[in-house]
DNA sequence: TAGGCCATCTGGTCCT
DNA sequence: AGGACCAGATGGCCTA
């Protein structure tokens, strides 16, 4: 999906099979050592025959090993089994969180090609926030302009729900919805060009999250020619008239401008 | 090599 | 009691 797959795949996201089995095996053979804090300290792939089981199967087996063999002997093993179970749950929880993060990345307007590296988690969240703000502002601007036009003539009422205002404003570059615009070739004669609907946005450039990464560092494009946002992401406002959704170019509306420092204290303090 | 990012482990807290 | 959630610690991988 992205160029970061090699990096991601280089480190298995769910090595619980090997880890739990190794831990369980060590526990079963040598007893509980008491020190299990070392991450991935157990060498994986040493038990080929045990590979391929799901986390649930593995967890159940680990619990069975404890309950059948050492039920009377080692309460530490039970504790260890519980610890493994908790760890497994936590891994699953984080995995689900990452799945949701990937889902968010998929709908974000950044280049999805192989030349663009995957957004980091913090970049994804910040970009998503700014993207939502941008869309909200665009929608409000569209409503305002349309109401000005139709409101003055008085012969036609505005029905945003019937028309789909954002579709008239032009698809967002890079966004999956860009290819699903209801009226791709017909531009409403009374509606302003896309640039007009977002002019006020790009004109008020204030960054809400500049403390996180400077110079549009949210994306790490391997090729400098493609720009920091990739070849398919032309840094809106430059060539397309659309505002850049990145944290460097976006202006949160006044009523949310303080949110970045209030609701995301860690983000504001994340600039090391 | 330093720094960024990430996965995982772990203990604590809160909720059902 | 068990599960979800959270944050700190730790170590690995990758890039500049």
Image (cartoon, coloured by chain):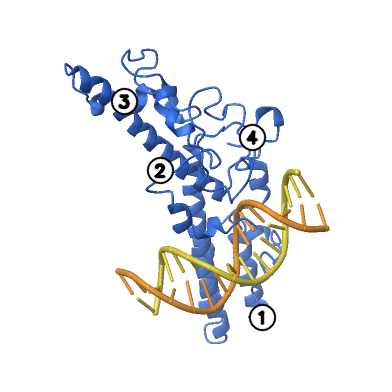
Chain colours: A blue, B orange, C yellow
Residue at 68% over, 79% down: A30
Separation of residues labelled 4 and 3 (CA atoms): 33 Å
- Mark 2 burial class by Cα count in 10 Å: few <14, some 14-19, many 20+: some
Q: Nearer the viewer, mark 3 or mark 1?
A: 3
Tell me which label, 3 or 1, sits earlier in the chain: 1
Residue A156 left/right relative to A122: left
Which element is circle 1 on?
A: loop
Which element is circle 2 on?
A: loop
Residue for badge 3: A145
Q: Nearer the viewer, mark 1 or mark 4?
A: 4
Separation of residues labelled 3 and 1 (CA atoms): 70 Å
Q: Quadrant of the C terminus of chain A?
A: bottom right
Letter of the chain that mark 4 sits on in the rendering: A
Which is more toward the observer, A27 or A93? A93
Quick check: marks 3 and 1 in contact, CB under 8 Å? no
Which element is circle 4 on?
A: loop
The image's mark for residue A253 is: 2
The image's mark for residue A67 is: none
């Amino acid at each position: 999906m992205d160029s970061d797959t090699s990096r991601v795949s280089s480190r298995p996201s769910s090595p619980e099979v090997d880890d739990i089995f190794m831990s369980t095996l060590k526990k079963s053979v040598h007893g509980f050592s008491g020190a299990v804090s070392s991450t991935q300290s157990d060498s994986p792939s040493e038990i080929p025959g045990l590979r391929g089981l799901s986390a649930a199967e593995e967890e159940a087996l680990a619990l069975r090993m404890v309950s059948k063999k050492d039920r009377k002997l080692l309460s530490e093993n039970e504790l260890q089994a519980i610890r493994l179970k908790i760890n497994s749950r936590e891994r699953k929880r984080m995995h689900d969180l990452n799945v949701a993060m990937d889902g968010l990345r998929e709908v974000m307007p950044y280049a999805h090609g192989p030349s663009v590296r995957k957004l980091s988690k913090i970049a994804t969240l910040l970009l998503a926030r700014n993207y939502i703000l941008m869309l909200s502002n665009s929608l409000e601007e569209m409503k305002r302009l349309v109401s000005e036009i139709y409101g003055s003539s008085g012969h036609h009422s505005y029905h945003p729900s019937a028309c789909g205002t954002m579709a008239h404003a032009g698809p967002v570059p890079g966004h999956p919805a860009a290819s699903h615009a209801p009226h791709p070739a017909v531009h409403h004669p009374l509606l302003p060009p896309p640039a007009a609907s977002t002019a006020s946005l790009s004109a008020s450039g204030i960054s809400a999250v500049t403390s996180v990464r400077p110079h549009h560092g949210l994306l790490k494009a391997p090729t400098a020619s493609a720009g920091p946002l990739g070849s398919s992401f032309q840094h809106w406002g430059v060539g397309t008239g659309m505002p850049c959704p990145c944290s460097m170019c976006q202006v949160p509306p006044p009523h949310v401008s303080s949110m970045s420092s209030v609701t995301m204290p860690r983000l504001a303090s994340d600039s090391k």
